[in-house]
């Protein structure tokens, strides 16, 4: 199968690893917290830009399962930033017809934080514009493990047979069930790795690694990444169609 892209091809689903807040702040002699604050501004810019470009799903890696190992003061600050974002931005996102979805492991999270997630999702559930997916306490290996455990339990209970487990069935047990796989994954900050992010879903995703730190990311950055995506030849394991 081959897909020919062009200037009219907009990715349905864009996933972003928002990297470089701390390095952005350090280069300016600022505390890391200043980088995280500016990162929230970049998030707001990116959501507005994605909505205007006709992107259907925007998935943002906000906090990984590994991020709990950071200094506790920084973790507390990041959690408070998330709470503040939900308190101040969800109403505006709702007015803009944006649907909010949270993926990741909620077990062990504070009850107040889980309640905020549930309220934001419930408020925006029927919205039909951009789907804004926040990956929080998310790790792809952990996600796949949870899916395998759920399927193993169904097999043990006799509800399904091992032969019934197909890639589609596994996909339906992941946090992203019902969403298209990402067409484009962007990572800022110059690093070139996926850091345990959407490993199953990115089997045929196009990767674009940008040098700018996340606080510098804006609509022009998103447009540049999409232009790079449009220049790609997506063959999905096949050969490009030959023309006479």
Image: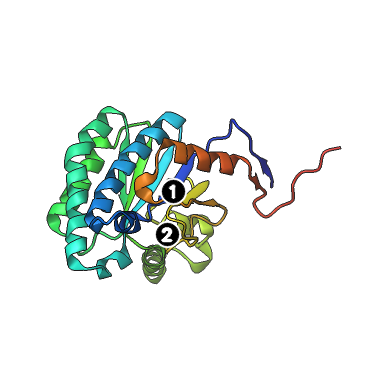
Which residue is the extreme one toward the left? 112
Which residue is at the front of the view, 69 or 23? 23
* Identity of the residue drawn at 46% across and 31% down: 54
State the image coordinates of residue 99 (x, y, percent, origin top left). Answer: 32, 37
153 horizontally vs 94: left or right? right
**What residue is disc 2 on?**
197
Which residue appears at 39% of the width and 51% of the height? 213
Q: Which mark is residue 15?
A: 1
Furthest-right residue in view?
A: 244
Q: Is residue 226 left or right of residue 96?
A: right
Count of numbered marks: 2
Q: Position of residue 209 (x, y in %)?
A: 50, 53
- Residue at x 25%, y 58% (from the top left corner): 32
Q: Find residue 231 and report its horizontal and vertical position in percent.
A: 63, 41
Give the CA distance from mark 1 to mark 2. Answer: 9 Å
* Residue 117 left/right relative to 219: left
> Image quadrant of residue 154?
bottom left
**Badge 1 local density, few (<14 within 10 Å), some, or many (20+)?**
many
Relative height, residue 46 to residue 31 (above, below): above
In the rendered structure, the answer to whether residue 165 lies left or right of residue 89 reads right
| Contact between labelled residues 2 and 1, with CB atoms less than 8 Å apart | yes
Q: In what element is the residue under mark 2?
A: loop
For mark 1, give the secondary structure: strand
Q: Quadrant of residue 158?
A: bottom left
Q: Position of residue 42 (x, y in %)?
A: 33, 43
Q: Is residue 109 visible?
A: no
């Amino acid at each position: 199968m081959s897909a020919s892209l062009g200037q009219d091809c907009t990715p349905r689903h864009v996933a972003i690893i928002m990297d470089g807040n701390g390095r952005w702040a350090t280069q300016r002699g600022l505390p890391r917290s200043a980088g995280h604050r500016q990162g929230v501004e970049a998030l707001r810019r990116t959501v507005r830009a994605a909505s205007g470009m006709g992107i259907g799903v925007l998935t943002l890696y906000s906090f990984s399962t590994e991020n709990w190992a950071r200094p506790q003061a920084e973790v507390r600050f990041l959690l408070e930033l998330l709470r503040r974002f939900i308190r101040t931005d969800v109403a505006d996102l709702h007015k803009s017809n944006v649907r909010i979805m949270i993926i990741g492991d909620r077990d062990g999270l504070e009850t107040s934080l889980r309640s905020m997630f549930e309220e934001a999702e419930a408020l925006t559930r029927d919205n039909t514009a951009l789907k804004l997916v926040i990956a929080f306490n998310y790790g792809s290996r952990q996600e796949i493990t949870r899916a395998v455990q759920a399927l193993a339990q169904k097999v043990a209970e006799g509800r399904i047979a091992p032969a019934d487990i197909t890639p589609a069935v596994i996909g339906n047990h992941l946090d992203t069930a019902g969403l298209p796989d990402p067409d484009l994954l962007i990572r800022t900050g110059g690093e070139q790795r996926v850091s345990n992010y959407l490993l199953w879903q990115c089997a045929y995703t196009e990767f674009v690694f940008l040098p700018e730190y996340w606080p510098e990311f804006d609509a022009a950055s998103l447009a540049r990444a999409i232009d790079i995506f449009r220049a790609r030849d997506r063959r999905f394991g096949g050969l490009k169609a030959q023309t006479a």
